[in-house]
Amino acid sequence: MAPGWWWSATDGRLVRYGSGVMRTQVMLLDHDPEVVAVACRPVEFVWREPDGSCLEHAPHLMARLDDGSGLLVDCAGQEEVSRRLAHRAEVVAAAVASVGWRYRIARPPDPVLAANLSWLAGYRHPRYRGGALAGRVAEAFQRSRPLIEGVRGLGDPVEVLPVVFHALWNGALSAPLDAPLHERVTVTAARTVGRRQA
């Protein structure tokens, strides 16, 4: 996948990504309810090694969290991390821990989770919120039930499904995303109102 831009539902801004691996991690951060902002390479670390050489590293992503702290993320395209990245990760993790932030190397997510979130992300824009229908959607799923039953009880699936998918993206509804989404998946209304549901 070529470099591009991701429209973030979290803060309504475009976030640059340099690869498909990075795009997937931007999507995961955009879906995370603790994240309030996402940026691409906003900071670079420069330090001197014991042998006198100078090293630098710019983590791929930064997320501002709802508690005010930061999370720096490097995106690994595979489970195995190179020695080069592992060394830089140690230095960056120590530096950010000293100011109360976190650092992680994000490995590829489960393919089913990634596919489900990619589908739901297509409905992340507020235009799919559904106005008055959104409240009815939440009511329809107060009791856990198969997706299609709740949708058909609300009206035309062509009109209702985008609102349901938006609610699944923003956390107003929940479903197990570690298994393939399908019409019989069990959907439930969230017990608490999240920040993205307002």
Image (spheres, rainbow, N blue to C red):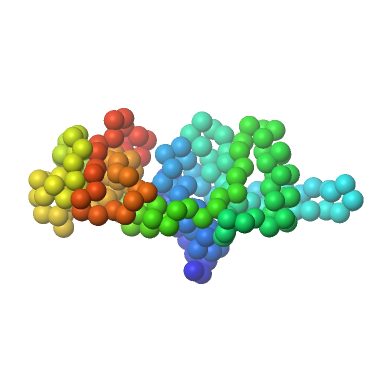
Task: From the viewer's perspective, tell me whether residue 168 is left or right of residue 101.
Answer: left
| Residue at screen point 37% across, 49% down | 178
Numbered-mark total = 0
What residue is rendered at 65% in x and 48% in y?
Answer: 43
Residue 131 seen in render = no
Give the residue drawn at x 67%, y 38%: 96
- Can residue 159 be seen from the camera position used here? yes
Find residue 90 and report its horizontal and vertical position in percent: 71, 44
Give the percent coordinates (x, y) of residue 53. 86, 54
- Residue sitting at the far right: 51
Q: Is residue 184 left or right of residue 7?
A: left
Q: Observer-nearest residue: 6 or 150?
A: 150
Indicate the position of residue 159 as horizontal and vertical percent values.
16, 54
Q: Is residue 13 above or below residue 36?
A: below
Position of residue 168 relative to residue 83, above or below, is: above
Q: Nearer the viewer, residue 181 or 71?
A: 181
Residue at the (61%, 38%) spot, across then down? 102
Where residue 111 sits, quadrant-wise, is bottom left
Give residue 131's position: percent from left, percent from top: 20, 44
User: Which quadrant of the rendered structure holds the C terminus?
Assistant: top left
